[in-house]
Image: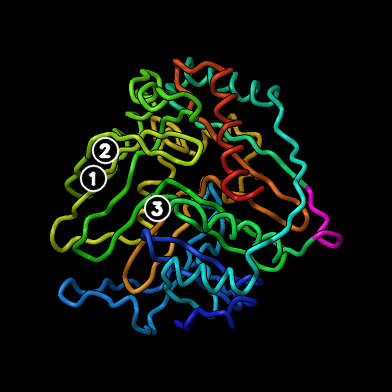
Amino acid sequence: MAKRTRFDANALRDFLKNGWLLAFEADQILVGWGEWSESAKPPEESFPSERQPERLSAPQSAQCTVYAPDFYLNDPKPWKATANWDIVSRGHFANHFLTGIGRNVNCEPLNWREPLSEDFANCWQKIQEGFRDRGLKKAVPVVFASATVDFSRTKSHEGLLGQILTQALELPSHLSLYGMWSENTGLFGATPEVLFSRDSVTAPICTMALAGTRGKSRADDREVLFNDPKERHEHQLVVDDLKGRLGTIGDVTVDSTQILELPTLFHLVTPVKACLPAGRNISFEDLVRLLHPTPALGVAPRALGFGEIRRWDPLAKERQRFGAPFGVTWQGRHHCVVAIRNVQWQGNSLKLGSGCGVVGESEFSREWSELGLKRESVKRMLGL
């Protein structure tokens, strides 16, 4: 069973070798380190009482478990845990991390091999067939750039992770840092998208519709995105889907659509929450099955499911955890993000994915450009 242990400089070596993290509030980060274990079943779930809220700064013996399946939810043991875990402030984590690894992490530029437009064109054609023949309204194709690193000559896997983390700690807090890694494989990202979050048994389930993107290059880009008919249509498909899905379990409130500003991009975002009836609860895995993948990463209508995605997804195996749920349950709390804006590595191979929302009004050149913008934003955010 995972044990809550104070995270300090002494834990850093084990953390870089076998570890994970997830930022769940603006100034709070869950971290884990030590030997990994995995299970097909989740830990027993018990929410903290509303009258006795958890004290995040106090030592706890409660379990803390990571949920990290692949995108298609095929992992037979998606529940992962390390021997140790803790909750730390962003400042506490940064101080120990940067002191332990050094603030100047040198890295050679990576030579990225970008995806081919011809491959995307083939995928595009199959999606157009879906619009015409199968009732498809929205699809989210994914492409990957790849790179190779000679770890024996230039750096260790721990050095790569240190490089990424050093850069990521400079990012704004509305990007949720997340990741998990072992000796020669890993995932790290900074996602703007939360699949769901819930603080207690009586607290609402909070999620968001995040769809609609524009780069930051002109003074009017924010306004152009907000008023773009194609982007608003794409976004509304996600809002309507979330409202319908959550409406099957509780009362749903949809807030107004806003602009989310990231370092290099703007997104449309609409907060959504659901309040369950008294006495009714829903498990972490049931919430995943209810919401994943939203049309922001999957398809609309949702009934077409994974089968539709596989029709035009030649990279189904390559996706691995890109776009998958990545969450943690601890002390009765649930927090799960959507694993986008990340880099994955195995051995000396790195890959960096990006996806775009395609609807009937979409233009090939515009979507291809968006895919590139998203990959470039990740490279800048993570120092790659």
Q: Position of residue 12 (x, y in %)?
A: 60, 76
Relative to 114, residue 40 above or below: below
Rendering coords of residue 345 (x, y %)? 69, 54
Q: Nearer the viewer, residue 28 or 94?
A: 94
Q: To which quarter of the image does residue 236 belong?
A: top left
Is residue 66 highlighted in magenta?
no
Quick check: is 153 in the magenta stretch? Answer: yes
Dot 3 or dot 1, earlier in sequence: 1
Point out the stretch of residues depicted in magenta.
Answer: 148-154
Give the spatial CA distance, label 2 vs label 1: 7 Å
The single residue placed furthest to the right in the displayed view is 153
Quarter-of-image position of residue 115: top right
Q: Nearer the viewer, mark 3 or mark 1?
A: 3
Which residue is tagged 1?
A: 248
For residue 191, the mark is: none
Q: Which residue is mark 2?
A: 244
Q: Position of residue 233 (x, y in %)?
A: 35, 23
Disc ID at residue 288? 3
Q: What is the secondary structure assignment of the residue under circle 2?
A: helix
- Circles 2 and 1, Cβ within 8 Å, touching? The answer is yes
- 331 over 375 or under it: above or below: below
Residue 275 appearing in the image: yes
Identity, as a three-letter code, of the amino acid under mark 1: Thr
Structural distance between the alpha carbons of marks 3 and 2: 15 Å
The local secondary structure at tag 1 comes to loop
Residue occupying image coordinates x 14% and y 56%: 277
* Residue 59, x across and y down, in percent: 37, 84
Circle 1 crowding by C-alpha within 10 Å: few under 14, some 14–19, many from 20: few
The residue drawn where x is 52% and y is 16% is: 363
Q: Tell me how the rendering is colored.
A: rainbow
Amino acid at the residue labelled 2: Gly
As drawn, is 208 to the left or to the right of 167? left
